Image: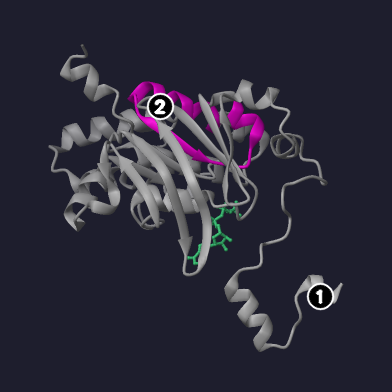
């Protein structure tokens, strides 16, 4: 029989059961089952507009599911009061694509910012914590530099240190590799794995980058055509003969992965207002 401790440790950091998400009359995704265990690195992949960022919004409670439940650390996100949601968010780190730093603060103060906002630590402890996180991203000795004095790749790493300074149990990364050169890309990927292992936190990456995410992920989910198309280890997906998975992984132009944005009821209404026939009728 599991002890209370071992039972607690099996609570998923993020758990989606039969979740549907959408905006207005447009359903983006439905029937999504997804689980991220503590310490796991999970990649969510899919073509442009497939709903990856939408999933991330559901995890942070910005978007309520139309169906099913989104649980973070075992708590139903949609059932939370504002203070409950804030308490859950304090246990999460989010690194947005434009993880913009405060340009009027130096590197140290950028990373110290969440600690100063949310914790009242003695200064010596705060300094130790910030330097520890800067050390984890290889930038301890850059603490004194102004944001204008660091490169774009360094700025990404500072943003990463800031995202983990509160030692979150779950970190959500929105396209952490976008716009990075191949070397920085490899370094950032290894850093994400390293931070996850070092802090024991669960990491979710929203990404298009197959090579780097497959190199560090324990599990991969592929979304497309409004649903979960595949899930498994990188090795499982690499072996898959499913036409959708193969087209996505091989980057082939022809296949089931849709290039065209799907026609929504809102577009159909716009089309009718402008006297435009639908494509099939025109053809
Ligand atoms: N606030 C919103 N209101 C209405 N529709 C939205 C909103 N945000 C996103 N969408 C729609 O939801 C769909 C999924 O968008 P989402 O940003 O989740 O895709 P994505 O997979 O992250 O795409 P990309 O890889 O291009 O960033 C898109 O069709 C988009 O137009």
Q: Nearer the viewer, residue 228 or 116?
A: 228
Q: Quadrant of residue 13?
A: top left
- Residue annotated with mark 2: 196
> Looking at this rendering, what residue extends furthest in the front direction?
281
**What residue is shown at x 33% (from left), y 25% (from top)?**
199
User: How far is mark 2 from mark 1, CA to CA?
Assistant: 52 Å
Would residue 270 be seen by someone viewing this image from the given angle?
A: yes
213 drawn magenta: yes
- Residue 65: percent from the left, percent from the top? 39, 54
Decide: is 233 above or below 151.
Answer: above
Q: Position of residue 149 (x, y in %)?
A: 49, 47
Prevailing SS of the magenta stretch = helix
Circle 1 sits on which residue? Answer: 281
Q: Which residues are magenta?
A: 188-214
Q: Position of residue 53 (x, y in %)?
A: 50, 52
Residue at point 13%, 43% (across, down): 120
**Where is ligand 1, by quadrant?**
bottom right
How dense is the environment of label 2, judged by Cα within 10 Å: few (below 14), some, or many (20 and up)?
many
Residue 143 drawn at (x, y percent): 37, 38
Q: Quadrant of the C terminus?
A: bottom right
Instruction: Please say whether residue 98 is visible from this viewpoint.
Output: no
């Amino acid at each position: 029989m599991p002890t209370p401790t071992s039972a607690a440790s099996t609570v998923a950091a993020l758990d989606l059961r039969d979740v549907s998400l959408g905006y207005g009359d447009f359903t983006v995704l439905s029937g999504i089952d997804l689980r991220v265990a503590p310490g796991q690195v999970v990649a969510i992949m899919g073509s442009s507009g497939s709903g990856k960022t939408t999933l991330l919004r559901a995890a942070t409670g910005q978007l309520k599911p139309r169906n099913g439940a989104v649980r973070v650390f075992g708590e139903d996100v949609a059932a939370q009061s504002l203070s409950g949601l804030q308490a859950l968010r304090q246990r999460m780190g989010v690194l947005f694509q434009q993880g913009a730093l405060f340009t009027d603060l130096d590197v140290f103060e950028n990373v110290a910012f969440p600690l100063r906002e949310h914790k009242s630590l003695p200064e010596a402890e705060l300094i130790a914590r910030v330097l520890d996180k800067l050390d984890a991203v290889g930038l301890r000795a850059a603490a004194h530099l102004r944001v204008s004095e660091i490169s774009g790749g360094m700025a990404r790493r500072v943003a990463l240190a800031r995202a983990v300074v509160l030692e979150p149990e779950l970190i959500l990364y929105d396209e952490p590799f976008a716009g990075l050169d191949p070397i920085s890309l490899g370094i950032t990927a290894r850093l994400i794995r390293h931070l996850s292992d070092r802090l024991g936190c669960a990491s979710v990456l929203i990404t298009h980058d197959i090579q780097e995410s497959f190199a560090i992920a324990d599990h991969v989910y592929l979304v497309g055509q409004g649903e979960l198309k595949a899930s498994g280890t990188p090795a499982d997906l690499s072996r898959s003969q499913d036409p959708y998975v193969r087209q996505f992984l091989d980057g082939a132009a022809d296949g089931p992965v849709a290039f065209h944005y799907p026609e929504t009821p809102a577009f159909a209404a716009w089309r009718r207002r402008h006297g435009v026939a639908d494509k099939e009728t025109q053809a």
